[in-house]
Amino acid sequence: MEKNIAVIKGDGIGPEIVTEALKVLDTVGEKYGHKFHYTDVLMGGCAIDATGVPLPQETVDICLASDSVFLGAVGGPKWDTLPGNLRPEAGLLGIRGALKLFANIRPAKLIPALAGACPLKEEITKNGLDLVIVRELIGGAYFGKRSTTVDENGVKTAADTMAYSDYEVERICRVAFEMARKRRKKVHSVDKANVLDSSRLWREIAHKVAAEYPDVEFQDILVDNTAMQLVRNPSQFDVIVTENLFGDILSDEASMITGSLGMIPSASLGATALGLYEPIHGSAPDIAGQNKANPIATILSAAMMLRYSFNLGKEADEIELAVNSVMDAGYRTGDIMSEGMKLCSCTEMGDLIAAKIRT
Ligand code: NAD
């Protein structure tokens, strides 16, 4: 198989972690007979420096013409004082919109060798923790009508509208049910239907889609209860589907209970196979250029790309197994280092994972 991948290395640790992930991808490619062609494109702070804007049109065009988009991270203090529409993060929102990526997929999985980094008690995590949050990404309160007004008495009021249309709910629910079919066949749909109209529509449509997937166990759950259950009994979850704002909060909570920011990948998907793959962490300017960053979240994002955009499940498994095996052997970057483990650099971690795949 041959695939064209648009690569956004970005800012801070972005170039370091992406280099390691591409090293791992090429190793898998060599082993299984695939060829990945990379085209470097600019986005974020480096794009502002080179072109004056965070998302040049050329980047959008190349991403749209590619089979997939792979991203390190963008942003940094150098660009923090720019107006909102010219900041590196505007590039991130812009590319998601331009590629019509409406589903954000964030797995939260406890790697056994890192169980010590999990802040939950062992009696809670002994049954394992392996869930995926499917978050609606381009609707709800973040994209609804907003206003700030001052009335005649000087009272200032701000409002953000959480609006969803039936088709938006239906397409994200389908992503969740399809994903559940490839996993443990269980979907929780999260809403606040006891209070919000948008959630009542969400629930109605979620039930309609669920009826088409009789092989998948389905349950509604209120968002407040979900927040509680994630720390009380996270093993009960397989796939959680929810709207944008609830998903933003719950996915950070779920990431936290697995231990380290440097370990968690993500995928943003739309209606086609073209997806955007990136680690959940930022550009870590405090350690940029020091060869200290943990490349594993980015390497696992490459595994997600193989699985979801290229349908190469076996190759994705190979990367995930190699990561587990290097963890089991006791190698750690600084962010996940603990007593008795072997400290290694970003480059060494990439080399170890690639070498494991080769053997
Ligand atoms: P951050 O995730 O970059 O860093 C938070 C802390 O975690 C830092 O101490 C950092 O050193 C550490 N860290 C993060 N990733 C690591 C890794 N792979 N290995 C080792 N340590 C790691 O968050 P921040 O400091 O709040 O933000 C820094 C910049 O990144 C900001 O400009 C922010 O806007 C941007 N950001 C970008 C994205 C993105 O590109 N998707 C996401 C979040 C933040």
Image: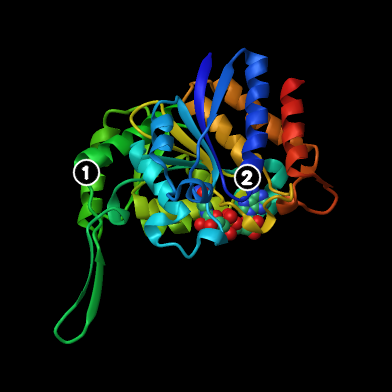
* Residue that badge 2 annotates: 263
Q: Earlier in the sequence, mark 2 or mark 1?
A: 1
Q: At 53% from the left edge and 25% from the top edge, which residue is drawn?
A: 306
Q: Secondary structure at mark 2?
A: helix
Q: Nearer the viewer, residue 35 or 133?
A: 35
Q: Nearer the viewer, residue 120 or 163?
A: 163
> Image check: 24 left or right of 45?
right
Residue that lies at the very extreme toward the bottom in this rendered image:
153
Residue 204: which disc?
1
- Position of residue 49 relative to residue 16, above or below, is below
Q: Amino acid at mark 1?
A: Glu
| Quarter of image, res 85 | bottom left
Circle 2 packing at 10 Å, graded few (<14), some (14-19), many (20+), is many
Relative image position of residue 212 (x, y in whole percent): 27, 28
Q: Nearer the viewer, residue 242 or 245?
A: 245
Q: At 58% from the left edge and 44% from the top edge, which residue is drawn?
A: 264
Residue that lies at the very extreme toward the right in this rendered image:
340
> Image check: 150 left or right of 307?
left
Q: CA distance from mark 2 to mark 1?
A: 36 Å
Q: At 45% from the left edge and 53% from the top edge, which residue is drawn?
A: 89
Instruction: Tell me the quadrant of the picture where the C terminus can be found.
Output: top right
Displayed-image quarter of ligand 1: bottom right
Q: Amino acid at mark 2?
A: Met
| Quarter of image, res 96 | top left
Q: Are marks 2 and 1 in contact (CB under 8 Å)?
A: no
- Any part of residue 95 in sight: yes
Relative image position of residue 234 (x, y in whole percent): 52, 49
